[in-house]
Image: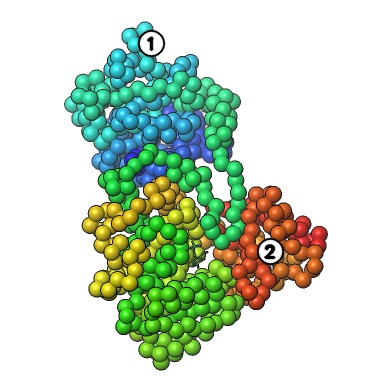
Amino acid sequence: MIKQAVIMAGGLGSRLKDKTVSMPKGFIELGNLPIIERSIKKLISCGIEEIIIGTGHCSEWYEKLSRRIPVIKLAHNSNYSQTGSMGTLACCAPLVKDDFLLLESDLVYDICGLKVLINETAKNVILASGETHSGDEVYLESDTKGFLVKHSKKIETIAQLAGELTGINRLTKDTLNKMVSYMQENIDSQPKMEYETAMSFVSSSSEINSKIYIKKINNYLWCEIDDDTHLENAKSNIFPKITESESLHNIRREVLLNPGPATTTDSVKYAQICADICPREKEFGELMTWVAEELSLFAGKKGSVETVFFGGSGTAADEAMISSCVPDSGKLLIIDNGAYGARMAKMAGVYRLNYEVYESSGFLPLDTEKVKQKLISGKFTHLAVVYHETTTGLLNPVSELGRFCHEHGIITIVDAVSAYAAIPIDMDRDGIDFMASTSNKNIQGMAGIALVFCRKEALENIKSYPMRNYYLNIWDQYEYFKKTKQTRFTPPVQTFYSLRQAIIEAKIETIEGRFTRYSSCWDELIKSVKKLNLEMLVPLEHQSKLITAIIEPSSSKYNFEIFHDLALSYGFTIYPGKLSNANTFRIANIGDIKPEEMKRFTEIMEDYFKGL
Ligand code: PLP
């Protein structure tokens, strides 16, 4: 699995004259976006976790970019004006951990080139194209097996033409190290060595593991921008063709305004399409370990929270907590102010726990003082509460209750299925011991993985509890995974790949940023609800801003099915209410949705309601 990319961006770009005197080439814009930023977006959407940029000329531009896009790491070549691209690549080498993609900074290219390299069986690969007539071609010569032996700008010196160098490559760390050694040995005679020189040398002189295979796509859409003619060609010819070609892979957009599974990005959907792999292989174990560690960081401070997975939906995570975390000697209080609190109570009944239910209004705030009194007077050892009651959009005061419980030695079990990864949560700060969520809501992955977050200390304590469940046993699943990097039973393999992609994207957006985007969508909704004089079930100040339960109008012409079908015909999916005592419909604003999309939905909603 390729996790890193290196972009060589140290050059002066002097052939572009005044355009690059005070700006690196990569910041030339096409379609209102710097070409480097478009390249970074493509790499991220192909599952690259970290992008190392080798800087030189006007490096401050990249420093600014790296502050905005946290997956970027910089390596500065302070001698950039006296070295070639290999000098910049050598500066990046210490940051490279494993196999990586290597690109030039001035490229405009079709994303399919990255996917082809990622899917190649060969470990060292140069992506080559057919004839470009760019006037600056680097021709590649291969041996009879297709491995690089030589490159040249003079076609007459090439014996067996294998294609033109595109500047997009895949290399192993070992091959990179050999290239760096070659540069260091020849620094005096070739101070301005280009990276392709080192590649040609290593490929032609090494044993099979460092030979570089030339993968040619004859009609590959790409260009580099070295001068004004290139730029003009990119603008009028190559870039529009790439835009069209890539758009053919777009998946029909459906905006899900139901409370999950939520809308996902195309890159999360495509991440599921990967080479078959046995989940007991090292690569998959490492992937799950990374996913667990990263998910834990969205739930608390580094090192304080463990993520335990089960193949299953959010309910499986809830059931794992209820059935694994309360010992026979324990006494559980369950807050029921909606369907999900009630569901946890049902589970407690099925497992014959010693429990009581605290019922509270589904739309008015919980009386925390009463809950606290109940916990103490009833000598409860455990509290189960839903962070965000998805039934109505009511937010429960989990931080306050968690801290109280922590002070009084009461274990807190929280269903955060619809809160996690949208609301910044710190389990340590808030004294939350166990917390459930799922891969398909605010983390914006696919359905199929149940997540239980455990505060380490609390997790250690359940170790000795006699098992009253099997598949859903948290301690067993955790212990086995720690020892083996495997789950006890078959995991949803491809769902893990898409969850990995969803995490990469969540890290870039940040949970705070995600909540801001969700809130902006909610603002659009509320504006429209107020304009239509519709009533909401929960007072605004107690709403989560993630889902809104709206009371259905009394007009006899109103029909949820008709409203639903109308919205669906425009690509918006809405959801009915879930309360027996109030007629509501629900609009969620989670997932990969944009405020402008919510605005479009509200226009449809307004048309429908005005027509009643
Ligand atoms: N808990 C809460 C708060 C939820 O919102 C949901 C689903 O919407 C669940 C539990 C159950 O999740 P699932 O339907 O994935 O089993």
459 relative position to 127: left or right: left
- Establish whether ligand 1 lies closer than 8 Å to the Cβ of label 2: no
The residue closer to the viewer here, 381 or 37, is 381
Tag 2 residue: 527
Q: Earlier in the sequence, mark 1 or mark 2?
A: 1
Instruction: Report the residue at 38% width, 33% height from top.
Output: 119
The N terminus lies in quadrant: top left
Q: Tell me: residue 453, above or below residue 338.
A: above
Residue 5 in picture, x, y percent from top left: 36, 38
Report the mark closest to the observer, 1 or 2. 2
Q: Amino acid at mark 2?
A: Lys
Tag 1 residue: 155
Q: Amino acid at mark 1?
A: Ile
Residue 142 in picture, x, y percent from top left: 32, 16
Instruction: Report the residue at 80% width, 64% height from top.
Output: 557
Instruction: Report the residue at 38% width, 35% height from top.
Output: 118
The C terminus lies in quadrant: bottom right
Query: How far is mark 1 from mark 2, CA to CA?
Result: 65 Å
596 relative position to 445: left or right: right
Disc 1 is placed on an element classified as helix
Residue 280 can be seen in this image = yes
Residue 20 can be seen in this image = no
Question: Extreme left residue here?
Answer: 185
Q: Tell me: residue 326, above or below residue 101.
A: below
Instruction: Report the residue at 33% width, 15% height from top.
Output: 141
Q: Tell me: residue 194, above or below residue 387.
A: above
Residue 83, quarter of the rendered image: top left
